[in-house]
Image (cartoon, rainbow, N blue to C red):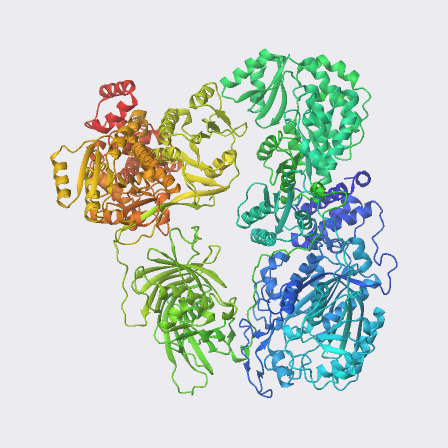
Amino acid sequence: MELNGIRRRLATAKEAERHRLLLELIRAAAAEALDRPGPLPLDPGRAFGAQGVRGRAAGRLRERLSEATGLPLPATVVFDYPTPGALAGRLCALLLDEPAGPGGANGQMEAEEPIAIVGMGCRLPGDVRSPEGLWRLVHNGTDAISEFPEDRGWTVQQHPDPDHLGTTVTRHAGFLYDAPDFDAGFFAISPGEAVTIDPQHRLLLETTWKAVEDARIDPTSLRGSRTGVFVGLMYSEYGARIRRVPPGAEGYRVVGSMPSVASGRLAYTFGFEGPAVTVDTACSSSLVAMHLAAQSLRKGECTLAVAGGATVMATPWGYIEFSRQRGLAPDGRCRSFSADAAGSSWSEGVGVLLLERLSDARRHGHRVLAVVRGSAVNQDGASNGLTAPNGPAQQRVIRQALAHAGLTTAEVDAVDAHGAGTRLGDPIEAQALLATYGQGRPAGRPLWLGSLKSNIGHTQAAAGAAGVIKMVMAMRHGVLPRSLHITEPTPHVDWTSGAVELLTEARDWPADGRPRRAAVSSFGVGGTNAHIILEQAAPEPERPHAPEADGEPRPLPWPVSGHGAAGLRAQARRLADFLRAGPAAPDADLAYSLATTRATLTDRAVVVAADRAEAIARLTALAEGDQGPRVARATAVPRDRLAFVFPGQGSQWPGMAAELMSCYPVFRESIKECGRSLAPHTDWSLAKVLRGESGAPTLDRVDVVQPALFAVMVSLAALWRSFGVEPSAVAGHSQGEIAAARVAGALSLEDAARVVALRSRALRVLSGRGGMVSVAAPAGQVLRTLERWGGAVSVAAVNGPRSLVISGDPGALGEALAAFEAEGIRARRIPVDYASHSAQVEEIRDTLLTELSGIRPRPATVPFYSTVSGEPLDTTALDTGYWVRNLRDTVQFDRTVRRLLADGHTTFLEMSPHPVLTPGIQETAEEAGADEVLTVESLRRNEGGPARLLTAVAEAHVHGVAVDWSPAFAPHRSPARRPAVLRLSSGAATGLRTRPRPPPMFTTAGLDGIDHPLLGAAIPLADGGGGTLFTGTLSLATHPWLADHAVADVLVVPGTALVEAALRAGAECTGRAMLEELVLQAPLILPEQGTVRIQLSVGGPDGTGRRALILSSRPEDAGADEPWTRHAEGTLAPGGGHPRQDPGPWPPTGAREIDLDDCYRQLAKTGLHYGPAFQGLKRLWRLADDLCLEAELPDSAGESGRYGLHPALFDAALHAAALAGPSGAEPLTRLPFSWSGVALYTAGATRLRARLSFTGPQSLTLTAMDPLGHPVLSVGTLGMRPVTAEALHRAAGTAGTALLRLEWRRQAPEHPAGPDLTGWAWVGAGAPPAQPPDGRPYRDLAALRAELDAGAAVPPVIVLAEPATPEGTDPFTAARAALHRTLAAIQDWAAEERLAGTRLVVLTQGAVAATPGALPDPALAAVWGLVRSAQAEYPDRIGLVDTDDPGRSRAAVAAAVHAGEAQAAVRDGALLVPRLARVTATDGPGGPAWPADGTVLVTGGLGTLGRLVVRHLVTTHGARRLVILSRSGGDSAEVREFVGELLAQGANVQVVKGDAADPAVLERVLDGIPQEHPLAAVAHLAGALDDGVLAAQTPQRLDRVLRPKAEAAWQLHRLTARARVPLLAFSSLSGVLGPAGQAGYAAANAFVDALVQRRRGTGLPGVSMGWGMWATRSGLTGALSDTDARLIARTGVRPLTDEEGLALFDQARATGEPVVFPLGLDITALNSGAPDGIPPLLRGLTARTPARRAGAAEAPEPAGEDLAARLAATPEAERDALLLGVVRGHIAAVLGYDDPRAVAERRPFSDIGFDSLRALQLRNRLGAATGRRLPATLVFDHPNPAALSRYLRTLLLPDPAPAPTAPDGQPGPDQADQVIERLNSASLEEVLDFIDHQLGE
């Protein structure tokens, strides 16, 4: 690029365009410097070095830029301007000869101007994390002193004698226990470097961020500002403690802990460019830093200043040193100015304040928290000793500060004193205060004296800043908090010498007509004194209330961001919690503050919500990983090349701009301007047209719609620009080019309005003489087809690679349309009656040239890409002739988009009321292979309000487009009020923990330090075997939490601690280890006084990598010859892989919660005494014989970070076993004694969810995860020993049976995808509206077939939508009709070969009760039953989806289809899937007892099972009067014998012949029941089967099955409802499992289940029992063959014995569930034997889906083309054997054989158990294996395995394979022809009947 050309372009471009041009230049030059293709995607805000441009590459970059610009750039330019953005700014200044920015102060500064505190942040003892937290602590009088942290390796012992060497007089102070925790990723610091950074520096980084946010300033906005940094530090031992650093981080170690680097690191990280100073004056450091910061601000050296200090102690040496000097209080508490003061307390903390000149703060609108009126610093000089305080010096510094502030002593109300609690220092300080502030005060107004150190101890370098924050908060609350621990004032002070009083109680702090004032003192140990005087800020002016919403609430954007997905979710959760807490501020103020004061990080989301409740709900969903409606979420990438695109006609809709006109002034004014410019050329009002006012012309007229669209598009562009979104290019489609030219600045608004108005008016001449058709095909193909019509049809527009529009004469267009349809090309007419972009335009050429003459185009300010040429265009060429070509020539939109992409434009914003161009852009980008292309639509049809627009802006923002959110709040402004900037809770970090290894404290002894609380050091053994000896010490002083673990009043180290030590030792030896075995041999007893030494010896590895370990101990004071006690032996093995995250619900479905009230008191009665540190068990559930629990590490157990898993938390997880034991067992106390297979996956957990599974009376397995489901720990086997003599008893009950219920569980899609509905077909009366490209609606499948016949494209998905049952409709009648419709539709779909690859989805509304309290629709539930059966016959081809919102059905179906679940429900946008889960039942007769004198009505009670149940009712439940209604009656001898048996039992039995589905019969039976024996219960046992594959089913066959089961149930329910008696209905598991061949039976039972559930919902009693198989053969199971039984058994459902079934019958009544499924269950068989894996419905019953065995349960070959390739690679002689093995494997799977060799290769299929259903199953399996569409008559055509395998060979290898031959004994050619003739003439039912009965004969 030539130099003058660059300068000219920069001179005429806007600032944003200049920046973009130079960034492009830098990116291109960087790519050349690194020898990479294309522009390098550099982030403008990140340093070059961080993006790979460093060293020689930086030099080459400078050379390329010098060449390109002609500027003599210095060699250091990339270092002087270290980011692409900064360098672009410098280049711009040089090229335009702009002066350099000012380096000094801006104008004169007031030398004594007050300094405002505008932001504060702190982390202090007592878990204080904010100024508000500090205020709560001091206001409540909290004592934050606690014990030494356990995670720093401090083994120093406490000793009361201060002269005892190497000890400390105290182990108490104020600590930041989580000081080592650091969110390194948040600051783009690598974990390796983070380890080397002193925690003090880390805390300053985090707290500075919070302080800036507290000032309502976006921290990233200060990059490049003259912000100063002044921080105090006094410790630097951290670096010396780091023995090991990660690879590559060694060079950071020294810099990481240098105090001088702390201020520089802050400036570097935040991009501050003012002074950066680290101050070390010991305890006065942070107050001195504030003083220096205030001076720098007054001098103009900086515009803002960060001031503060931090203290974190890396070693305990300070305690040892000051113990010798007798300066520490034995209890660690500062008793400031108290008579019993005994010393100070070394504590930790960080405090940061953001300072600004008061005038600047007022001008910038920053909130002023308080004002620094004056400050002073001095020195003690040659005082009584180096560290001794000096009273006169303290008096001088106070007077200097008062003089600086211009105040008298009486004008200061209170002082937060240094007050360290020492016997010498406190009296000296008090006398200095008395001599200054105590003098000249009015009566009754003493100086109030207190000290923060009484609460938190002496935080040393942070103390002054902490005191300032305390006093600022006190001023703002008007209360002076009390100082703690003052028994009486120290007698060493003459308190009568002045008016100073101690704050022994909190006091109100009235303003008294003047501002409150306070002072803070800090005195350094080296004699540097600092004093600061603070003044209450002037009150902020009250803001008027927010204006009342006029009508519906206006939506607001709620933006959040974070580093990484976890950080984003955490921020969303924090914001939701903040809003849920109910801040009183208006929502607009809160959202405005979020949008304008928070940093925008890489991972972003925006929630658009109309009110707070909606915002909370959507933020909560976002925090849980969901993305609902009106939520945009993405990871941003730099997007500075952005194109506005403007469509032609087609996006219009009535009312398309009305809402925006009422909400956004920018849009409204633009529409007004467009209206004024159009008025001279139109006879209608633009505003009236857009509002659809009466009398205004409609949008049907071309001369109305085009000008109206022009106005809307231009105004949308203005609105986007008001959001700060500026285009780098514009492009328009057809008439959209007029709007594009206007937005680019190439046409004045008047000229643009003239062009669009006159152009559209001219088009009216062509109306009625032409048309347009869209064609979905490549341009070349379309042009070839159009050749036959010559010029009568033209290509009007090329919109994408396969998207064109043609135009021309109506007749020729009709012929072309037919031609395309005949070629199978999708084409459709566009609803216009003219032919623009065709030869017809020539007729109006002269008119246009005349009327548009005088157009004055001008150079554009934004590049204009012409869709006439497909290239960028000099806009001075946009003359009259161009606009004629615009209407006449082909629209080259595809070409234009390609050019935009080639020029680096990756973002396209469509300026239209409905997206028209977006699909074509996406298609073009995909074909061009462009990455990171973003298309954003502004509005959508019927979504033209602020919610849609804000969602569009949000999409742009989250993907990386820079956005100014201010205009979003225009609807929330009023003349009297604008949204306010509020203080919000601090932003969330990602929480990455980086903790250094401990210091080399043992290196001089030849030991390696181990950073573990139980193991302090290690030494490799010198025996050459590779062993290691680990050592450590245990005592109540170092591990006080162990005092809370006592067994029989003896302190015992828990076995979990020994396991923890073994795992850590293994990790040290091998990197990661599993504890293969550990056996505890003797308890490890802990003395109440003294220390125990432990040794853990780990041997060298054997051949398999295993290592033996031994753990021993002995008292520390034991003699040299005293033996060690061996406590444990075990084996370590190399660690395994990480387990899969458990996606199941928590607590697990079906789990019953156990009350834990007084649980630890119960344990104590058995001898287990758990104190607070071990009382971590929080909740407990029983699930069959499993226990599920939640445990949490108590605070008193200390910190968890240095443990793999804290022993107290691990132990708490085992308390459940001691409390509950196996199901039904008496509670016993058990302790672990043996462990095997222990693996730790995640370290540092503080909360657990665990599952204990009992594998024996005294053994269990354990799996534990964190609350997010991430694995933490697993124990293969844990052996327990009872601590009492009582034996364990397992639960009584019948093994192998189960009561199940259907649950709906939330499921995250495995393959999330957007709702791509392109080309879908929506069939049926219940289908939601659908429009291309998102699908088409069809009345029925016949209508779809007609379109297919006409050449329409085959849809990828057909949605068959059943309408909801109207209220008041007879549910059975509705079910029957719905089932007939669904059956016919599925049969039509299955029979249509063209739909072989089309998935069918059946959509219902409310068919299932997927949420608590919901009631299902029985009619649609029946449809689910039928379709479930169909799914078994057509695996992976049919889906079932139920929705709760017909308006969102399309999205719901798409979500379910993409999730890959065969059955799903969508509720409130969440995907739910059905799973069977266990139900807990009581033993014995269940349910309420029936009245002895009542009558029980039984239907179907004379069958095999019926007689069994009736007998049970009489013998067990005491039923004495029964009426049995049976279709067969009681005439048979068998029935008479049965009735006689009941009579002998004392029962009165009446058998009535009749149909229970006949209401007249039922009414007669019910009327016949005597009043003295009223109806007590109804047992509905009747049913019927009519099995057959779906293709053979008919409505009549369905009705035969429905009547006795479903219709009878409906009539029984209806006619007995008033009696309110229990209805006990027998249904079948088939209703939910949907077995193949039982569509009618499944439908009938699903209807019954739903009916009973609905009955229960109305308050009527009843239960439906969906039985599995009974061992006793009945009329429903008597036809099962051995093969049937074998296959059923392999599903895990085993037959129930009579005893088991009747026990489950009783239990089912006791559950209280409306629907239960009693069955025999064999989990082992379920895991290993299911032919197609565990069915989804049963997966909740197993811990996992196991790998299936080779052989019968799986096909031993790859599928589809892989099988063909494998076959082709097999030698010719072996191919037949290979395919025969495949076929036999699948046959064995279908028939349930364990060994495929059991399938004889030439035995006819009919001889080995095949019927129509199994033929269908085999066809499906082989179709999947081969990837081929196989015929339904496959098994008939090739009637044995050998013949079938040869046929498959011809399909997979058609060319070389020989033609199939007939096997021996099979029909020859003549016979085969006869068979085929019979097949062709037979009905479908006859074909399948033939397969069933004649196969192989």
Q: Closest to the observer: 1105 or 1309?
A: 1309
In the rendered image, is residue 1579 in sight?
A: yes
Residue 755 as seen in the image, left or right of residue 625: right
Q: In x, y percent, where is residue 880?
A: 78, 21
Q: Closest to the observer: 1495 or 1059?
A: 1495
Residue drawn at (34%, 29%), measured in percent from left and top?
1830
Q: In x, y percent, where is residue 1447?
A: 52, 34
Tell me if residue 158 comes above or below residue 1575 in the rendering. below
Q: In x, y percent, where is residue 1547?
A: 17, 43
Residue farthest along the right direction in this orientation: 108
Residue 371 as seen in the image, left or right of residue 736: right
Tell me if residue 1194 comes above or below residue 171 in the rendering. above
Residue drawn at (42%, 66%), measured in percent from left and top?
1212
Residue 185 as seen in the image, left or right of residue 1567: right
**Where, quadrant-wise, is the N terminus in this rendering?**
top right
Residue drawn at (64%, 12%), measured in percent from left and top?
769
**Where, quadrant-wise, is the C terminus in this rendering?**
top left
Q: In x, y percent, where is residue 1893?
A: 21, 28
